[in-house]
Every structure is written in structure tokens, then in C-alpha cells.
Amino acid sequence: MKTNTILQGESLSKLKELPDKSVNMCLTSPPYWALRDYGVEGQLGLEETFDEYINKLCDIFDEVKRVLRDDGTCWVNIGDSYVSNGGIEERKDKKVYDSIEKSDKRGVTRATMKGYASKCLGMIPFRFAIEMVKRGWILRNTLIWHKPNCMPSSIKDRFTVDFEYIFLFSKKQNYYFEQQFEPYSQETINDGRFNPGSSDHHNYNWKAGGEDDNLRIKIQRGGFKQGSIEGRNKRAVWKINPKGFKEAHFAVYPEKLCETPIKAGCPEYVCKKCENPKIKDIEYEREETRSGKDSKYRDDIYVNSKVPQGLKKRVMCKTINRGYKSTCSCNEGFEGGIVLDPFFGSGTTGVVALKQSKKFIGIELNPKYIEIANKRLKPHLEQRKLFETIK
């Protein structure tokens, strides 16, 4: 199967050309319902009803599920839109749902739907997630993309919306996922539970993710049953500023938004023969610590040794990352996993995949956007080709 390529056409039909269980993950942001007219025939998002939109969208993800490996994940960024009745609620000659009408020359659209109060949120992300679960997907996370520098709003009867949703779906209960970390907060570092009984923890110059022995001791001695010197498990609210884009594309998500999903969901090492990924080699070390009121023993760690009586026993666990280990014995070499984006747009997903030494397959309906994407991807593809030649 050819990779690092863009297939021009409608997502559903192009996905049917891909073989079963051939990609490691999917990361995409489909056109939002009733928001923009991209000026190309067959586009998604201009359906007369959100029911029709969601059914079409989930039909596409049915095909995504087919081409996704059983250990694969699917990440979908999707936003909401407001319903407007357009002042036609009482017109009996209208359909139950009225068609979308363009509101200005910029291509922005408004949804007019009888039976729903004007100015009501369509709740599109939730309707989409529920339908996906009905079709067999497992919803593992609802992530919040918080936009600190969001566009200002002139609306005065509601709050400015400064976030969007990212849903993490899996095919199976067990799937490939590389844990991601973020630094411990200063509040946690200064908390007595993290460093109990110490008089100098407020003055300790602690650096998140460091290899300092004192840091390791603090984690072991603290109140955490499991602690990683890499940091804490990454949280579900991601503060990422949208970035401007000079080319003719209205909706471009920033590269930073793609970095964590691709790191977590797409393996860097995939066997060239059996296509099984390498996984992180994590070692869990069980250690017994003793602490008490006597300062003589408070900062000592005892591992499999005799300790003074009367001291409180603690059993702690620390994690050590020892790189990656193979899950097969093929010995045929490894290559980067494949990221699929069925709504490729300007190619941000592909750019980030290449930067992480992984591969991509994009599908895009609009030929103008393919030109933009190819322009962005060209230097990264040339750099990879040069590296492979030298190697």
C-alpha cells in the first residue's frame, strides 16, 4: 500500500480502496455542520439536517474502522454550531427540517431547522459520539481543546466559546497507546503528601522530568502508590493557541494539537513483516521505605534490609522507562506507523506524522487544498528521502 500520499476524492469512496486493517491510527477534523461552504461539489457539512450529517459522517468512520488495525485508535476533532429557525417556524408549507441558507459572501452558513428554537446549540459533537458508540466504537476519552487566544465574539447574551472537543475512540478494549506525561504542578511538589516530613521541600530546586536521585527519593517516599520521574499522566484539557494560516484554507488546526495524539496513538517502530509495533519497556520497581518521627531515619530508604522497629512501613512503586522492546521475533527491521486523515485539508496531520518519523495517508476532496498540502509536505518528504539515502 502506498503511503505518504494524498488521495483526491470523496472520503467514503476512497476509503473503500484501502485494504482491511492497514493503518495504525486515524486523526482528523471533519467539516463542521452548517458552518462553511468550501465551494466543492459533494462536500460534507451542508446537509439539510444534522441527522443526515451525522449519518454520513459515521458511514465514513465505519470504513475508517475497517481499515484500522484492531489495536488502532481514532481521534476526531469536532466543533458545535448553532441552530437558527430563520423566522419560518409557523410556515406549514415547509419541511420538518429546512435547508441551510448562506448568510454572507464569505461562505459562512446558517442552519434553519423547524422544531428547534432559534439560537439553540445543535449539540453536534455529542450526537456524533453517541452514534459512533452505537456503531461499535469504544469512546475512551473526551478531550477539551482550550483556545486561550480564541476569536473575540460580538455576542452579548452568552459567553464566548473558547474550546472544541476531541474524541478518542478505539476498536477494541486493548489497543496501542503510549502514555504521555506532563510536569508535576508546583502545588504537588510543595504538597506534604508528595514530600512528607521534609523541612526543605519548599526550597528544593526541582526540575520536572529530571533524573536527580533526590527527586526519585521524593517520589518514592511520597504518598503516591505509583510515581514516574517523567511527570504525571497527561490531563484531558489541552491549552493550545490556534495558529494563523496564510493559504486559502478557513479551518486549519495547529500542529501542536496533532503532536500528542500521534505520539500516543501511532507507534514509531512497526515490524516490516508482521506489522506489530514495539512497545515501551517499562519496569516497575517495588521498594519498601520507612519513615517516623525520628529525623535520623526519616530520609533513609531501606530496600530488602532490616530496619529499626517502630518505624512506619510504606510500600512504593516507581516506574523506569528503558526504551522500546519488540513484540515479535521476525528480525525484519522496523519502520514508522501509518496515520490516516480522511479529511486531509491543508495537510497538518501529515506534516506532524513526518516530523515524528511516521507515515501518512490523506484523503481530500478539494484539489486546491491538495495543492496547499503538497506544498507544505514537500520539504519534509525531501528531507526524509535524503535521510534514507544517507542511511
Image: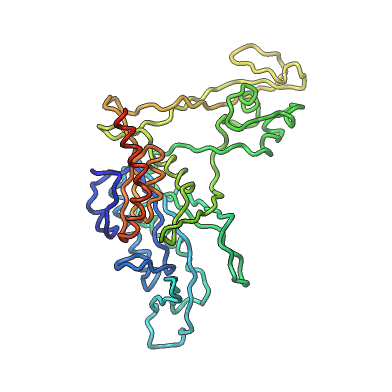
Residue 331 horizontal side relative to residue 267, left or right: left
- Residue 151: x percent and y percent? 56, 62
- Residue 356: x percent and y percent? 41, 38
Q: Nearer the viewer, residue 4 or 382?
A: 382
Residue 371 vertical placement versus 301 (above, below): below
What residue is shown at x 23% (from left), y 47% (from top)? 19
What residue is shown at x 63% (from left), y 72% (from top)? 156
| Farthest-out residue, top | 306
Q: Nearer the viewer, residue 352 or 341?
A: 352
What residue is shown at x 65% (from left), y 31% (from top)? 223
Count the marks: how many? 0
> Quarter of the image holding residue 233?
top right
> Quarter of the image holding residue 290?
top right
- Say which quadrant the N terminus sits in: top left
- Residue 236: x percent and y percent? 53, 47
Residue 347 horizontal side relative to residue 186, left or right: left
Q: Nearer the viewer, residue 105 or 241?
A: 105
- Say which quadrant the C terminus sits in: top left
Question: Is residue 101 in sight in this rendering?
Answer: yes
Residue 352 vertical placement versus 245 (above, below): above
